[in-house]
Amino acid sequence: MKAVLQRVSSASVRIGDEVVGKIGQGLAVLLGVVDGDGVEEADFLAEKAANLRIFGDEQGKMNRSLLDIGGGMLVVSNFTLCADTRHGRRPSFTGAAGPKTADSLYLRFVAAVKDTGVTSVQTGRFGADMLVSIENDGPVTVILDTDEIMKRPGKV
């Protein structure tokens, strides 16, 4: 599972003319589910994202987590994070989990984030063409990959 976390002062996701998710200060998370991912990866990544200390304290040091500041999280499914660009010029997405599995694990991730105590969790709509607006604060952007963090060899 791969996630791009952006510290934001605000973020929203729109489908057509409808705003389907919106947060103030917090994290915008683009989430990609890789073939072979499961509940363990979703739960691990949710806990990691909610507790990652990337928000400033009184001295401006990154010592606070999303939970510490009481911020929100906007989670948007993004299979293109699973792109394989090693060959040619057109990315291959064969490493992304299939839609049924990806949707299930996306929802599991969202539920696991809520279980950590994050009180405002908003989402996009799985599989939809969305317009994501992000006001990146810092800018602070962190990439998390469970294959790297959990040290699981053999997965692309």
Image (cartoon, helix red, strand yellow):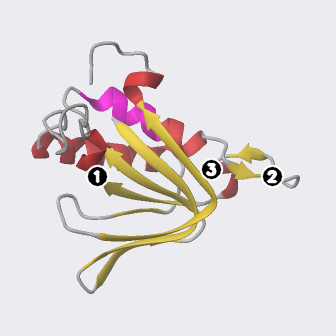
Judging by the rendered image, the residue that carries numbered circle 2 is 57
- Amino acid type at mark 1: Asn
Q: Relative to 29, does residue 52 appear above or below in the rendering?
A: above
| Magenta span includes 117 | no
Q: What element carries label 1?
A: loop
Q: Which of 13 and 68 is in front in this view?
A: 13
Report the span colored magenta.
37-46
Residue at horizontal 43 percent and vertical 23 percent from the top: 148
Q: Where is residue 101 in the image (x, y as percent from the top left)?
A: 15, 39
Q: Residue at x 21, y 26 (%)?
A: 36
Where is the C terminus found, in terms of image quarters?
top left
- Please say if the residues under marks 1 and 3 sit with CB atoms less than 8 Å apart: no
SS assignment for the magenta stretch, majority? helix
Looking at this rendering, what residue extends furthest in the front direction?
88
Using the image, tell me which numbered label, if any, was put on residue 78.
Answer: 1
Badge nearest the viewer, 2 or 1: 1
Nearer-N-terminus badge (1/3):
3
Image quarter hosting the N terminus: top left
On the image, which quarter does residue 76 sit in?
Answer: bottom left
Q: Which amino acid does label 2 sit on?
A: Asp
Residue 9 placement: quadrant:
bottom right
